[in-house]
């Protein structure tokens, strides 16, 4: 039976009424991709307040890798709510925090001694990673990448690349942040081609230390192993190894931001494993909590111990309910095969998308790692002009036909897939059929693209 059930044109009357209340009560800066209000969710399916059912290809922006309301996670939360809700880890600690730290210390890449602390979000995890790296190295500088996204707090906005809508109007940002190009081969900043480029962009870090900021002033390089908001860009397999070699040579730490790429999304618990790298610090959030807010920072023990007692923390950081949810998430990965499922979903998408590429000229690139898959849409293969309006039209079409998708990319021209990894084959195919229909309807040929998006 079809999962998608649209009982009303969307948004339905109840969602519309809520949207009106929202407009009065909530600032417009908090925008949303789809104006349907959720009533319930299960696995990879959302139901709205008007009884419409959608296949969820967004997963709360990558937070629901184990599925909506995963029974094990829900049970762990229920059990914890019967015991206690909050004490504050800095006042009266609890065992689940310690156990979760112990497990992440083992599960994260690298056989060295590690320590872990918890926070409430991805941005807070990045903030703390920067504090810890600075405390350890006694250096101020942080090198981040073009097209990076690390959050919306002031320090993480400084590290984030995209200007509109994230950064514009919010200056000044904290300083000592330097930016270099990422290995975005489809839009190489140096107009080179892999592998003949010999990873020029990674080796160029040496040049940055000579011409932009001296290495003795740099605490860390922070990178997403696969760009998230930046458009699911996957660097060549040997890119990070080369980059880390340069970092190590100059005693600069390497921080992997696995907030979006972590917890099975790329076909391994951490994307770093797919590159065979061992970051000095890893930051996590999103799917770690199975739907509850929690972020984590795991790093080499001596680095994590650099800030003195009281230098780290937060009132709700590592809430006991979120810790139990995260422990359940780790159990699910340990006892199931979600990483294999992610690779399977990714392969399936790649095959379908390769067929689309031969039919729809708007598809500039199909790319991804595991189930972190995307289509970059362009108006011309020659100029690679980003097809941002068309991307909007496609996500709108999908939503109107029962599939929640979200876009990404500095140019807003990437459609990214973050479906829960528990999605069934039937649901995946149903969702992909709608996406294909959107491409066919809106972008059947170059000419149609131009006409169909006018006025949208
Ligand atoms: C790679 C990455 N880092 C950090 C963040 C910020 O996380 P949060 O929204 O939980 O603060 C995000 C959010 O999308 C992200 O994708």
Image (tube, rainbow, N blue to C red):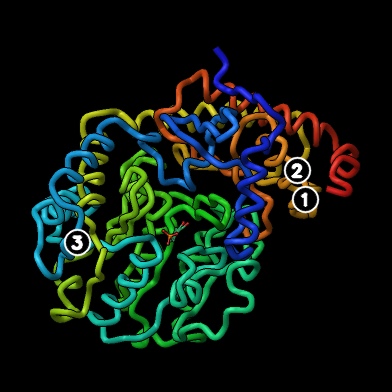
Ligand 1 lies under 8 Å from the Cβ of mark 1: no
Which is more toward the observer, 239 or 94?
A: 94
> Which SS class for mark 1?
helix
Which mark is nearer the camera, 2 or 3? 2
Q: Write the residue at 47% across / 29% down.
A: 345
The residue identified by callout 3 is 116
Q: Is residue 403 visible?
A: yes
Q: Position of residue 442 (x, y in %)?
A: 80, 35
Q: Residue furthest top?
A: 1
Circle 1 packing at 10 Å, graded few (<14), some (14-19), many (20+), is: some
Q: How many marks?
A: 3
Which is more toward the observer, 359 or 154?
A: 154
* Image quadrant, ligand 1: bottom left
Q: Position of residue 105 (x, y in %)?
A: 17, 54
The residue identified by callout 2 is 393
- The answer to which of marks 3 and 1 sits earlier in the sequence is 3
Q: CA distance from mark 2 to mark 3?
A: 43 Å
Q: Is residue 357 visible?
A: no
> Which SS class for mark 2?
helix
Circle 2 packing at 10 Å, graded few (<14), some (14-19), many (20+), is: some
* Left or right of residue 101, residue 403 in this image: right
> Which SS class for mark 3?
strand
Residue 57 sits above or below residue 98 on the image: above
Name the quadrant containing residue 318: bottom left
Asked if the residue at tag 2 contacts the one at tag 1, i.e. Cβ–Cβ closer than 8 Å, the answer is yes
Q: Position of residue 151 (x, y in %)?
A: 46, 65
The residue identified by callout 1 is 389
Q: Write the residue at 28% across / 64% down.
A: 281
Q: CA distance from mark 1 to mark 2?
A: 6 Å
Q: Write the residue at 31% across / 86% down.
A: 139
* Left or right of residue 301, residue 437 in this image: right
């Amino acid at each position: 039976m079809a999962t998608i059930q649209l009982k009303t044109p969307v948004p339905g009357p109840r969602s519309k009424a809520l949207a009106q209340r929202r407009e009065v009560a909530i600032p417009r800066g908090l925008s949303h991709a789809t104006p349907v209000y959720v009533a319930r969710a299960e696995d990879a399916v959302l139901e709205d307040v008007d009884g419409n059912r959608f296949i969820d290809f967004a997963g709360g922006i990558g937070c629901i890798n184990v599925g909506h309301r995963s029974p094990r996670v829900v049970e762990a939360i229920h059990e914890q709510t019967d015991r206690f809700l909050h004490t504050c880890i800095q006042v009266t600690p609890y065992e689940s925090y310690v156990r979760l730290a112990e497990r992440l210390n083992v599960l994260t890449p690298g056989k060295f001694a590690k320590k872990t602390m918890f926070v409430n979000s991805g941005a807070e995890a990045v903030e703390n990673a920067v504090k810890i790296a600075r405390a350890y190295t006694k250096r101020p500088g942080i090198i981040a990448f073009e097209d990076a996204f690390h959050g919306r707090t002031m320090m993480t906005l400084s590290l984030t690349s995209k200007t509109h809508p994230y950064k514009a109007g919010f200056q000044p940002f904290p300083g000592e942040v330097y930016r270099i190009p990422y290995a975005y081969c489809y839009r190489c900043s140096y107009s080179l081609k892999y592998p003949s480029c010999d990873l020029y962009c990674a080796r160029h870090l040496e040049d940055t230390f000579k011409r932009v900021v001296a290495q003795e002033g740099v605490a860390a390089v922070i990178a997403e192993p696969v760009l998230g908001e930046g458009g699911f860009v996957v660097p060549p397999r040997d890119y990070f190894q080369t980059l880390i070699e340069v970092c190590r040579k100059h005693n600069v730490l390497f921080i992997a931001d696995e907030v979006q790429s972590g917890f099975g999304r790329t076909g391994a618990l951490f994307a770093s494993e797919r590159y065979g790298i061992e970051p000095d610090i890893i930051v996590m959030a999103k799917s770690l909590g199975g739907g509850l807010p929690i972020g984590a920072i795991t790093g080499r023990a001596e680095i994590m111990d650099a800030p003195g007692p009281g230098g780290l923390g937060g009132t709700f950081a590592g809430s006991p309910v979120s810790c139990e949810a995260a422990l359940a998430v780790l159990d699910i990965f340990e006892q199931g095969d979600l990483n294999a499922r992610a690779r399977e979903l990714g392969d399936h998408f790649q095959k379908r998308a390769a067929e689309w590429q031969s039919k729809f000229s708007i598809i500039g690139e199909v790319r991804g790692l595991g189930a972190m898959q995307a289509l970059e849409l362009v108006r011309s293969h020659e100029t690679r002009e980003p097809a941002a309006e068309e991307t909007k039209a496609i996500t709108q079409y999908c939503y109107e036909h029962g599939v929640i998708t979200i876009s990404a990319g500095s140019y807003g021209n990437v459609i990214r897939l973050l479906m829960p990894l528990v999605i069934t084959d039937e649901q995946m195919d149903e969702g992909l059929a709608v996406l294909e229909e959107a491409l066919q309807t809106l972008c059947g040929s170059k000419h149609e693209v131009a006409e169909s998006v006018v006025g949208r």
